[in-house]
Structures are given as structure tokens and as C-alpha cells.
Amino acid sequence: MIVVGERIHVISPRVKAAFEAHDAQTIQQLALRQAEAGASFIDLNIGPAKKTGAELMPWLVDIVQAVTAVPLSLDTTNAVAMEAGLQRCKATAMLNSTSAQPARQEAMLPLAAKYGTHLVALTLTEQGIPGDATARADVAMGLLDAIAAAGVDIEKVYLDPLVLPVSADQCGCEVTIEAIRYFKQLADPAPKAIVGLSNVSNGSPNEIRPLINRVYLALLMGAGLDAAIIDPNDEDLMQTIRIVEQRDESTPVAKLLVAVADASAAMEELDPALVDMHDSEQADTYKTVRILTNKTLYAHSYLRV
């Protein structure tokens, strides 16, 4: 599993303040902690940054590369800032992102080709996010055609089916899982898939967000997920990746997470006979599978039902 560390993001008040003050130490500490936790890429998300992006992005690239050799993912809709950062990258970077929107393709695809980057491609159109998996796969197919025509190496492309919050669009969780399955049938070799995982728990109570993220990750890995934009300092989340990848069944909960991924891979419901409902961790995991696969109606209090 490719892990893209998400912690250097302008939406964080601490990070935003560090950007504005050019506080290199705070950014470097965040980068180092993610690198030490096993991040494959470190995401530098400056948002649109219309006024300051062209200066901010290369500064970020330089200060992060001064403390770690982990490759960078540059995350902005500002094409000028994107190129300014790519020019400073020492290792092959990830460009995050393009989409099916013509203006975004025109801005980002030439940069991905010019700098030989990895590329995140969102199944997002001018009309928004398609409502079903078939439509997202159709958008993905068009994206692959446009990306290939631009001269980008298809093997460096990561299709993003877009994760929606379970609290706002419960049906969308299963649509995203199904879209990844469809992506894998679009070409040979199969395209890679990536998600911004924490979106699934946006709007849910903070105390249950980590559980929702972990269980959804297991379901997505079963469907064929290759990469995720996550917090690598979430030790339980990183353990979930290891458990599923290594098929570690050494504890009851680990065994259940493997079963969750296997059921997703087989496109089957998780067998309730595999769950000891007297074990609170197993029971909570099972209830979370049920809400993420739209078998039980989501409510903030679903674990208490």
C-alpha cells in the first residue's frame, strides 16, 4: 500500500499559521514524523494559494527535502505554484491532481508529462461527482485516454473515485468501493486506485472517526485499493494496512479485519458467524462494516444500537 502522508495541509490551523509565518521547523517536524511512520510520499497541500502559491510551494519543497528524502506529493489547483514546486523536487513527485474538467486537464497534464510525475486523477466532471460506480468508471476511462494522449506514463496514474462522508451520503461509500472494482477492469495492466480516506468520516463524532477510517480502509483494500492519502501517524490505521497485507490473524480483531477485506474482495457480505458480538472491538467493527456497506442506517450513535 502506497501511503501519502496528509498532515501538511493548509486546512489545519497550525499548518496554515506555519505557512504564513514561514515557520520551517513546524513543517519539518510534521514531515519527519510522517517519514518515520512509513509514509511513501509526503503531501504538501497549499490549496489554491492564488496570491502566494508560486513562492510558497518551492519553499515547502526545499525545507522538507532538507530533512527527508521521502518523495513529495504536491497538492494545489494553482498550476504556476505546481510547476514552481516540481522544478525543485529531487525525486519523482506525485502531482495531486487533475480531473475530467477541461481547464484542470489543460493546466496539469502538460506538467505531469514534462516532469514525469506520478499523477492523481479525480473522477470529477464539470457537473460534479457522478452518482454511481458505472458513471465514475466511464469518467475514469475518458481520463485515461486524455492522460495517455498528453504523454503521461499510464503506470504512474492513480485514479481517485472520490470518497464521500458516510454521515452525508451513506450510499456513496459502497459506490466508491464498486468504482475501484470497475477501475481494475479498464485496462491491462489494471490502473492504480487512490483515495483520500479520512473524507469518509468527515462530519462524524471525533471519537468514532478512527474506527470508520480503519474499517473502510479494509473494505477498500479488499476491492483493490493501491494507495491512500492518510495520517501515517495514526498507528492503528497503519496496523490495519499491515494486518490486511500480511494476512495477520494473530488476534481476534486482526482476524476479523482480514475477513472484512476478503468479503469485499469476493463481493460478499461479511459472515456474522465470524464475529464474537460479546467482544466490543469485534462488535464495533461489524457494526461499522454494516453502515459502510449500507446494510444499517447510519447515525452518529450507531455503535450504541
Image (cartoon, rainbow, N blue to C red):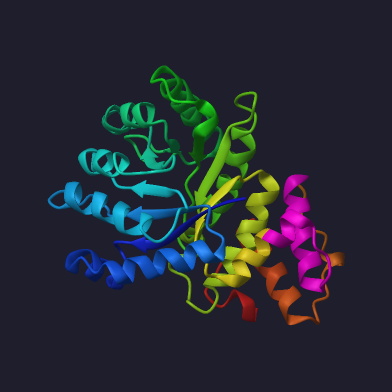
Q: Nearer the viewer, residue 65 or 97?
A: 65
Q: Nearer the viewer, residue 158 or 215?
A: 158
Location of residue 130 (image quadrant): top left
In the rendering, at what x and y percent does residue 76 appear?
A: 29, 47
Q: Is residue 122 visible?
A: no
**Residue 216 part of the magenta-drawn span:** no
Image vertical order of residue 292 relative to residue 134, above or below: below
**Residue furthest front as drawn:** 66
Q: Residue furthest right?
A: 273
Instruction: Residue 304 in the image: state x and y as whole percent.
Output: 63, 81
Inspect the magenta stretch and tell me whether residue 263 lies in it: yes
Taking the view exactly as shown, the residue that stands out farthest to the left is: 51
- Quadrant containing the C terminus is bottom right
Q: Nearer the viewer, residue 87 or 238?
A: 87
Which image quadrant is residue 293 in? bottom right
- Which residue appears at 55% of the width and 70% of the height? 234
At which x and y percent is residue 85?
Answer: 28, 44
Residue 254 percent across, percent down from the top left: 77, 67
Range of magenta residues: 242-267
Q: Is residue 229 left or right of residue 59?
A: right
Residue shown at 25% from the left, 49% from the top: 58
Identity of the residue drawn at 29% across and 34% down:
104
**Image side of residue 7 versus residue 271, left or right:** left
| Position of 96 relative to 289 (above/below) | above
Q: Nearer the viewer, residue 301 or 153?
A: 153
Magenta-highlighted stretch: main secondary structure?
helix
